[in-house]
Amino acid sequence: MSNDWSPIGSTPAIKEFSSMYPIVFGVENALRSVMADYLEETFGRMDWRTLIRDARANGLDYCRSLNASDRKGN
């Protein structure tokens, strides 16, 4: 029996998956950036999160947390 046994797979497989981490990290950051830009454009403000947070604090659910007047252009 070889010494490279692991309960989650062989050591070479783990090393191969860990080498993909920079790619996964880069894709995740890109998706977050695109989503933040989209939401800023949609709501017309960078602090769009506060609209949702304040609505939730006032007891509204996520479907009704934003009025049409909170969106850009209304």
Image (tube, grey):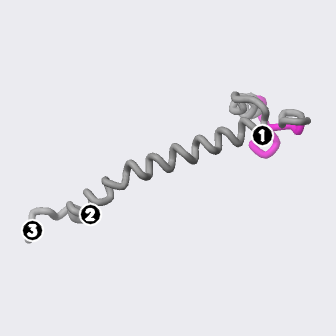
What's drawn in magenta, residue-wise?
58-68
Type of amino acid at the residue the image marks with label 2: Ala
* 59 shown above or below 7: above
Q: Which mark is residue 13?
A: 2
Instruction: Report x, y in % for residue 68.
Output: 88, 39
Predominant secondary structure, magenta span: loop
Identify the mark nearer the N-term, 2 or 3. Answer: 3
* Residue at x 70%, y 29% (from the top left corner): 46
Queried whether the magenta region covers residue 63, the answer comes back as: yes
Which quadrant of the view contains residue 52?
top right
Quick one: label 1, few (<14), some, or many (20+) residues within 10 Å? some
Residue 35's quadrant in the figure?
A: top right
Q: Quadrant of the C terminus?
A: top right
- Mark 2 / mark 1, whichever is N-terminal: 2
Q: In the displayed structure, does residue 2 sit left or right of residue 6?
A: left
Quarter of the image where the N terminus is located: bottom left
Under mark 1, the amino acid is Thr
User: Where residue 23 sits in the image (x, y, percent)?
Assistant: 42, 52
The residue tagged 1 is 42
Q: Secondary structure at mark 2?
A: helix
Q: Is residue 61 above or below residue 17?
A: above
Say which residue label 3 marks.
2
